[in-house]
Image: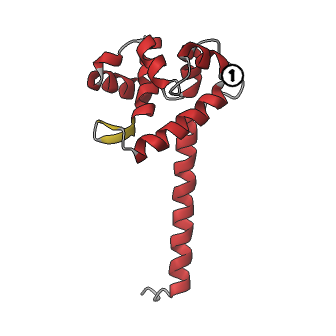
Amino acid sequence: MMRPINRRTFLSAVAVGVAGFVSATAQRASAFWRHAPTATRAATPADLVGAFFSDAVGTRRIGTAYLQVAPTEASEAALITALAPPGQDPAQWWASIDLADLQKEARRRAHRDFKTPDVVDIGGWQLARTEARLAALWVVTHP
């Protein structure tokens, strides 16, 4: 026979479960968006997005699906331009950033995409357009 659970025990169990879930989710997200720490500066946008993503299969799926939704962006030049901050020369911006800068800019733009909302439906998932464009840039530069 089970003993009744008091409020303190219940809340402790819930807190431990939530903490474990948050930790596991953060680890998975971190693994997806991070790269090997040795690559800090890349020579080209292709190198940067190659270092940005760690899951080639998932990135290819997202990028390919996005290119079907936005076929006018199916070139490296179009995506590089779309991903550069507004008002900046795309070639100069990409040449001046490292991976940490790209991660910060992608995070900032993804938050903005969800607020505006500028999201795309990829396989039932709502993704920030910036995230989908980064995956698409990886696809067009890593055939």
Q: Position of residue 108 (x, y in %)?
A: 54, 40
Q: Is residue 1 above or below residue 25?
A: below
Q: Position of residue 8 (x, y in %)?
A: 56, 84
Residue lying at 53% horizontally and 34% vertically, measured from the top left: 106
Protein image colouring: secondary structure
Residue lying at 57% horizontally and 62% vertically, measured from the top left: 19
Crowdedness near tag 1: few (<14), some (14–19) or many (≥20) residues, C-alpha within 10 Å: few
Q: Quadrant of residue 99?
A: top right
Residue lying at 54% horizontally and 56% vertically, measured from the top left: 22
Residue 41 visible here:
yes
The quadrant the N terminus occupies is: bottom left
Q: Quadrant of residue 114?
A: top left
Which one is nearer the viewer's eye here, 98 or 81?
A: 81
Q: Quadrant of residue 129?
A: top left
Q: Position of residue 3 (x, y in %)?
A: 47, 88
Residue lying at 59% horizontally and 12% vertically, measured from the top left: 44
Residue 142 visible here:
no
Callout 1 amino acid: Ala
- 72 left or right of 116 in image: left
Q: Residue furthest front?
A: 87
Which one is nearer the viewer's eye here, 55 or 134?
A: 134
Q: Is residue 59 above or below residue 72?
A: below
Q: Position of residue 12 (x, y in %)?
A: 56, 76
Helix, strand or loop under label 1: loop
Q: Identify the residue position indicated by label 1 in the image.
A: 39
Which one is nearer the viewer's eye here, 47 or 16?
A: 47
- 64 left or right of 90 in image: left
The quadrant the C terminus occupies is: top left
